[in-house]
Amino acid sequence: MFMYLVIRCGGCRTFTYVDRFQQWKLCANCGETIDVRRATVYLEVEDYHVAESVVEQLEEHLHRTKKKDLTREELDTLRMQYAQWLRSGA
Ligand SMILES: [Zn+2]
């Protein structure tokens, strides 16, 4: 069961995650109220430790590649890697 959604703040573009039943999230970085239903979901994960690590990896990836957002392809790769990782039972 995927309980957490990895999303991004529409104001400052910081990655964060929310409980999937949560409707609003206050951005810890800029104070913007994020409307979860309207946010782009980057990844759905089953626990918040994973969500935290995905958020970190995404920030790092964009910083390293100096990009503003993930491409469709990168997003697909991320989801695929996560699915494989889940299947491997790690
Ligand atoms: Zn923000």
Image (cartoon, rainbow, N blue to C red):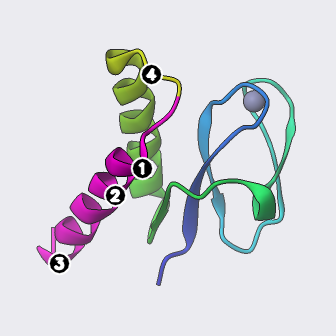
Q: Residue furthest left?
A: 88
Q: Residues within 10 Å of mark 1 (few under 14, many from 20)?
A: few
Q: Amino acid at mark 1?
A: Arg
Judging by the rendered image, the residue that carries numbered circle 2 is 76
Report the magenta residues as a range: 69-90
Relative height, residue 47 to residue 76 (above, below): below
Residue 72 image label: 1
As helix, strand or loop, the secondary structure at mark 4 comes to loop
Tell me the crowding category of disc 2: few under 14, some 14 to 19, or many 20 or more residues within 10 angstroms, Cα based: some
Q: Which mark is residue 87?
A: 3
Q: Measuring 72% from the left and 25% from the top, which residue is drawn there?
A: 12
Q: Quadrant of residue 32?
A: top right
Kind of residue sitting beneath label 4: Lys
- Image quadrant where residue 57 sits: top left
Residue 60, quarter of the rendered image = top left
- Looking at the rendered structure, the secondary structure element under dot 3 is helix
The image shows residue 3 at horizontal and vertical percentages of 55, 74
Q: Where's residue 41, x and y in %?
A: 59, 58
Q: Is mark 2 within 8 Å of ligand 1?
A: no
